[in-house]
Every structure is written in structure tokens, then in C-alpha cells.
Amino acid sequence: MPKKNIVVLVSGGGTNLQALIDAQGRGELGNGEITCVIASKADAYALTRAADNGIKARTLIRKDYGDIASYSKAMRDLLIEEKADLIVYAGFMTILDENVCDAFPNQMINVHPALIPSFCGKGFYGLHVHECALQKGVKVSGATVHFVTAECDAGPIILQKAVEVQEGDTPEALQKRIMEQAEWKILPKAVQLFCDGKIEVKDGKTIISE
């Protein structure tokens, strides 16, 4: 069975990318291999992480394109060129349109720093997610790995992990705990399940076979 090509999309520091690289180093990505990292910003530190680990890195700069449609078409062409079997959003800050989603149905996954359907959708990214969770006074938050569709944060859920909110939490403290205890664990696991053919989507829901 040939290895599945994993292409990781990034915009910034790439901590989730690092979690995937570390998991790959431990042999935990199953039948998958990270073959390319594509950044939407030229100065994304994630590009350095890719280079340091001998992974091909490319840039497709969002501000070079006039609109989402032209950027999405360019991204679709690049992903086809890279023979992507699985596309992972790892802190990728651009919502791509159906041009990409239709070309790669149930082949694109994202990790979101909350328990979807809470604190998700357009505008919910970065620290803002955790600010809203704390304002609401939730006792648990966490992370969700889901398939990407043209509608933001609305694709079938693959894995979720809850993280307790602690008294006196700041958005930064909660963000860090969710990354360490949830995101960095369930993202590599979801990638492994996908690459080993263990995820089936039926009626908008995922069925996972171990």
C-alpha cells in the first residue's frame, strides 16, 4: 500500500505542524508521510520548521491574490501538483472556497480549539475562541478535528478531546493547555486514522474503525 502524501497548510508559527512532525518521527502517522508544507505568508515560522526537518516547503501568498476565488483556484492547482492525499490545516488562517473542497472531498482536515459546535465559525480563531469561552463561563473546553467543507467549521467531526477550564484562567493559559492536552494529541491521531483508512463518512457523520 503506497504511502499517503500529507500536505500541511500553515500561516504562522506552526506548533501543530511541529506536533505532526514529532508524531511522524515516532512512527505515529500510520501510512502517511508529510511531503509538503504550504504557507500563506512568506515569513511564517512554520517554513523554518519544515526546512529543519527536510520537508519540502512552498509559499502561496494570500495577499498576492485579489480575492478568495483566485487564491483558492491557485491552491487547488498546487495541491493537485503536490499529489496531496490528505490536506491538514495547521493554523491556516484562510477559508478556501468550494473549488478546493470539491476537488478534495473528505480529504481536508482542520483542528479547531473548541468543542464544536461551541465557539466556532467565521471569526472564531486564535485567542478570540478562548476569550469567548471564558466570557461564557464554560467549565470544559477542548479541541475538535473535523473535515473541512466550504462552510467554516461545519464539516463532519472526526475526534474531540475535552480540557478542563481552571479558576483564574486567562485566554493565553487556556489556549496553551488546549494545545498541549488536546490539539497536539488528536490532530496526529486523526491523520493516522485517515492514512490507515479507518475513517468513513456517512450521512454527514464519521464512523471510525480501530
Image (cartoon, rainbow, N blue to C red):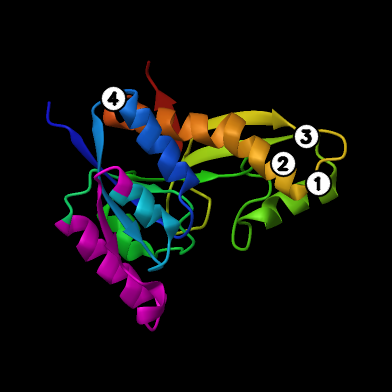
Q: Are marks 3 and 1 in contact (CB under 8 Å)?
A: yes
Which mark's residue is nearer the viewer, 1 or 2? Answer: 2
Q: Position of residue 98 (x, y in %)?
A: 36, 63
- The answer to whether 36 is drawn above or below residue 200 in the figure is below
The residues bearing labels 3 and 2 have C-alpha atoms spaced at a distance of 7 Å
Residue bounds of the magenta highlight: 52-81
The residue identified by callout 3 is 165
Give the residue displayed 41% in from the left and 32% down from the top: 188
Q: What kind of residue is marked 2?
A: Leu
Q: Residue furthest left?
A: 2
Q: Position of residue 102 (x, y in %)?
A: 30, 57
Q: What kind of residue is marked 3?
A: Val
Q: Secondary structure at mark 1?
A: helix
The residues bearing labels 2 and 4 have C-alpha atoms spaced at a distance of 30 Å
Q: Secondary structure at mark 4?
A: loop
Q: Is residue 166 magenta?
A: no
The residue identified by callout 2 is 174
The residues bearing labels 3 and 1 have C-alpha atoms spaced at a distance of 8 Å
Give the crowd class for mark 4: few <14, some 14-19, many >=20 residues within 10 Å. some
Q: Is residue 203 visible in the rendered structure shown here?
A: no
Give the crowd class for mark 2: few <14, some 14-19, many >=20 residues within 10 Å. many
